[in-house]
Image (spheres, rainbow, N blue to C red):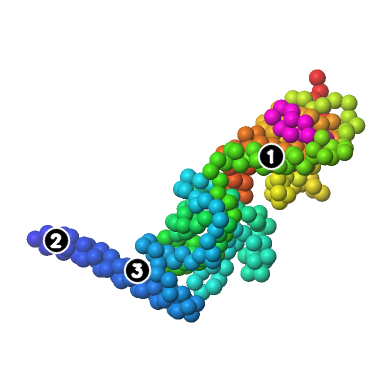
Amino acid sequence: MIRMQEIFRRLVFLPVTALFIFACGEKDDSLQKEKEMRLLRQYLESHNIDKEPESSGIYYISHGEGQGIRPERNDWVIINYTARTINDRIFDTTDEEVARRNNIYSSSVIYGDKRMDLSLLGLKGVLEGLLLMKENEAARLIIPSHLAYGSVGTGLIPPYSTIIYDIELVRVIRDPEAYEQELIVDYTGLYIDSTHLSVQQLNGIYFIELGQGTGETYPGDGDIARVYYRGSFTDGRVFDSNTGGKTLDITVGGKNVIPGFEEGIKLMKEEGRARIVLPSSLAYGPAGSGTNIPGYTPLVFDLELVELQVKEE
């Protein structure tokens, strides 16, 4: 009889305990939301903002109507922005000087215009704001936490934080493949009037010889090419380089570098120098690489073939 009473007591006690924990969590959640809304009201008052929010809750404050088209959800866009918490702490930016002034600079970040696929944009509030903008428009987006990082937060952003984006929509890209080709044509066109340089389209890449090599043979499968390189975008921003450091040793035919890079090496002789332009199909394709190289990005490499070790027969 005692055993049955104990079992009954535990069965009753466990749900009550769970309910108590849930109630406490719900109360804490409510308090956090109230605090967020209080800070938001204070921000609006201190900045003399009397604009009503959109139906979702974001505040969209345009700095002047843009000239151009509005993006759609499946478009790509080019943007610049600075993002801050509601207490004015900057946590992200595309502006290198702003990053340095606010002690968030990172050498692994490529600053400047940011190109992105809107269908992959995770921040709902930023996406909603961009869909309200036109090309060449700047705006401030005040984004409540339920459209940002929610009850979890991230990095420098605490849970239940309203965030603010000062954002500029530079361009809307309907066809990223056509835009990539535009970048390549504009870049290679710079050499049309050159008196000593020419662009050759070979094996799918654009090859510009900067200095003839002294070697007798071109690299073949199994040979080891020791290379200095400098990788940049067509606008000149550098994303990777080993110049001045250790050479990159490539086994030709080993497929341990992106295809276009190896194609460029195969067109050079020892001690030769060249600049190659790679379409994304021979680089990182539609997906890109990491956060710095978006999809459909042509790449420019300055190469120096320091030494060629020919495979022994």
Q: Secondary structure at mark 1?
A: helix
Amino acid under label 2? Phe
Residue beneath disc 2: 8
| Residue 114 x %, y % | 60, 53
Residue 5's place in the image compared with 118, above or below, is below
x, y percentage for residue 276?
75, 37
Residue tagged 3: 29
User: Which amino acid is tagged 3?
Assistant: Asp
Q: Could you tell me what secondary structure mostly forms the magenta stretch? A: strand
- Precedes in sequence: disc 1 or disc 3: 3
Instruction: Give the residue displayed 58% in from the left and 64% down from the top.
Output: 82
Q: Residue furthest toward the left? A: 1
Task: Name the residue located 17 percent from the left edge and 63 percent from the top edge.
Answer: 12
Q: Identify the residue position indicated by label 1 in the image.
A: 184
Residue 280 falls inside the magenta stretch: no
Secondary element under disc 3, as helix, strand or loop, is helix
Q: Which residues are magenta?
A: 199-210
Checking the image for residue 109, the label placed there is none
Q: Quadrant of the C terminus?
A: top right
Residue 214 visible from this viewpoint: yes
